[in-house]
Amino acid sequence: MAKRRREFRILGMTPSEIFKEFISGSTGKVAMALFIILVVVSIYALIVLPPNFAEIWNNPKYWQLNPQYAPPAWMDSVIGPVYSPQIYVNNYEYSVQQSNGVTYITISFSVDYKYDKPWNEIFVVINNPAIYNLPQPPVLSITVYRPDGNEIVLGPLPINRRVTTLGVAPEVMGQVNLFYAEKYHITGVVPTGSSATPYIFYTVDDGKLTPLKGVYNFRLVFYVFSQNASSLINREDLEIVLQGQIYGLMGTDNEGHDLWLGLLAGFPIDLAVGLLTALIIVVIAVVIGIVAGFYGGLVDEGLMRLTDFVILLPAFPLLIVFSVLFRWNIWYAVVFLAIVSWGASARIIRAMIMQIRNAQYIESAIIAGASRMWILRNHILPQIVPYILYLLVTNVPGAILTLTSINFLGLAGSEYPTWGILLYYAEVFGALTSGYWWWVVPPGLLVAFVAVVFILTAMASEPVVNPRLRYG
Amino acid sequence: MGLARTLAVRAATLVILLFIVLFVISFALAGPASEILKDEIMMETKSIIMNLMLHGHYNSTQIQQLQTQIMTQLENAYGLNKPPVIRTLYIMYNMIVFNWGYSYFPSEYGNVGGGKVVDIILSALPGTILLDTFGILLSALIGIEIGLRSALKYGSRSDRAVMYYAALSNGIPQWWLGIVMLLVFAFYLSQIHSPISFPVGGIISPKYYNLWLTNPLKIFTIPQAVLDLLWHFTLPLITVLIINVGGWAYFARTVVLSISQEDFVTFAKIKGLPEGHIVNRYIMRPAAPSILTSVFITIPFIIFGGFLVTEMVFHWWGLGYVYNIAIVGSPVPDLPVVVALTYASTLLYIVIIFIMEIVYIILDPRLRE
């Protein structure tokens, strides 16, 4: 005779019934949709970000070609062409000539300048150490053909490092100043300490500097003092970057970090932090709750005193002081936060178990000779599983918010940029007094988004775990 | 009799809690964290030596000797030469008698009380009390009113809106909303030369700052200063209200909902009593104590969570902002201030909890017996 399939029921409902109940309200539908978005974005973040992202993020050299404090690139499509975008010059003409032991590499390209704020800087990057480590380094000379028919000759500059920054070379500054002095009789156009590059794109109108719009042609000539094939600057060795004033989907920060990547990285780390805290809280709460509720008597009394104590602890000030004293990183903060936050959850679990324990079927089971473990496994655990999940969900937002606050103080840091850390640097580097909204608004919105997803999920599952509300 | 005993037990619990927190912090400071202290002594010694080298002529051996001498003297002064247990007790004793020492960077706090940590913290209390009292009471009043109304219209569109608002406001970090408010109403408003714009932070204009730090009560006798205070108070208060109203509304809604499902309410409805009568007599009355008590019980948790960081964002001269200066604003963490602040917060927190429990007992007739 075939064995009847045992139906799996929790709180008198099968999983599909629970799901139906959860999704029945509008809150449930919204929570479900947001949750799916959250999961999809997190998976996307994990795929997009390289495994050594923390290392990349903390390596300033990786970001040096990016503009600092740049608004997002889509700003131009909102307010019109104001800021020059970041340009990686790819379609340049490339030719090589050799004579008398010298290799001439000529590169020409053109850019259409139609913005109000010109490019900050021009970088010439050589990705082949053999070239910039030559005993006699190659030399670069640049000619700029401006739309007004004038030309500026810049250089020669020695190529003796990976990244050559055009505008800060003293020769270039002098040459740009000289250009304005000869053509417009203005001296000292380039302020000391700033780059000369933007001034390539200006003209003088009515005694004032104004942007000169139009097509600029650049001709770069590299002189390599050797005819070896190994010291030839190939196309793939060469990068030419015009550093814009806007960058990427979400702009940049003080170090030129692409904030879009930083925000994406926040998904896995903030979720991990929140879920781990909640998980530890729930594990402690379940163990304490079961032991207290199941054994009763003195054990219960003692554990409940302990729980009261933990509930009363001022978690946030303690978290601050220990993070300062022990220079904790975020994972220590997670563990500590969990250790001081399980009180309320443990009380709920204990109350549940006390209620179940006094039911008649437990009494019958005891009379029938069931062992404690059997009762725990067969009667109690299945009933509290939904509450455990519910508590897991309710504890996540609080943990994320608290740890974001701690990070915002510059404490409990991590290699991976969390949203709180982004906000900390934004505050430190004056995002507020300079109006860097793209650095401040998105991280907070994402924290709020993740927290709200969990809060809504908890709200929607309340009718499931609290049957009194079910037909309200 | 029973009431007095309950309160006594509660008070004892709270005092024990205070001692445990104090012990843990002191122990951490005396034992594992003494490395930080050593670093700071090293730094202090170096600055003294630098000063000496600028003003006198010493050769390198003399400097070496002086350095070790100053190091040992400072270590003795900080008690680093004593075993950790003694040091822990010593720190605990100093904390209890409010001998909290001196800040490392008094100028960061505007030289309040010559850098005495007690004075710095005392000067920060009025600001915290002002923001927290108004913030919590106003948000509770507004929130509970909204919650009641939405519970009575259960399932309506406005009720659902209140639910979503509650979820959203619980998820938004209060201090982050403060940043956004500052960005919009302080930075951008002044950027477009709007006639009305708000200050980018601070509790009061610089000319009244000294008065506020020394005698905040006197501020309230100068009308211009009060206006100035209110001008600075607007943004923090609005921020706090936006975030906290939602939570109260949701809570009040839940309580009222669960009571309106009780049999006696159903019976009153069946009896055909007028709607207003049912609401006032049968729902509000049983709901009031549990709403009010929870207002009181949660106050300390609210204060020592979001409010601290909100003060930092607004540079609001309160405990939170002093924390911020001690941790972020100083070249190295200002240990005496951080530790004393944590102790002071715990103390304040426990006092508030105790007061609230007395109020709780007064409000809940079941506990009075």
Image: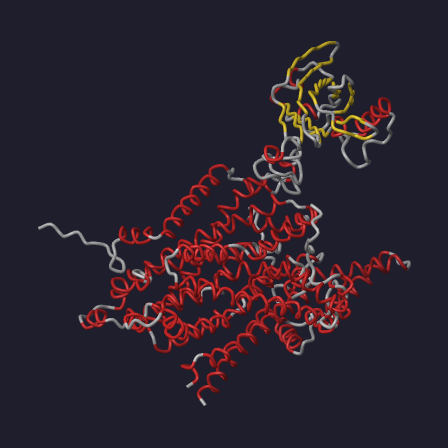
Q: Which of A293 and A252 is in front in this view?
A: A252
Q: Nearer the viewer, residue B317 or A126?
A: B317
The location of residue A143, given as percent across then percent down, is 75, 19
Relative horizontal placement of residue A445, taking residue A194 as reference (left or right): left
Residue B51's place in the image compared with A222, above or below, is: below
Which residue lies most toward the bottom here? B1
Quadrant of the image occupied by residue A405: bottom right
The location of residue B204, given as percent across then percent down, is 72, 63
> Which residue appears at 69% of the width and 30% of the height?
A163
The location of residue A373, given as percent across then percent down, is 27, 65
Which residue lies most toward the left here? A1
Does residue A303 appear anywhere in the picture? no
Relative horizontal placement of residue A87, taking residue A356 as reference (left or right): right
Does residue A212 appear anywhere in the picture? yes
Snapshot colouring:
secondary structure
Q: Report the quarter where the C terminus of chain A lies.
A: bottom left
Query: How many numbered marks does the figure carry?
Result: 0
Residue A44's place in the image compared with A340, above or below, is: above
The location of residue A307, given as percent across then percent down, is 44, 71
Residue B42's place in the image compared with A231, above or below, is: below
Quadrant of the image occupied by residue B28: bottom right
Residue B306's place in the image compared with B24, above or below, is: above
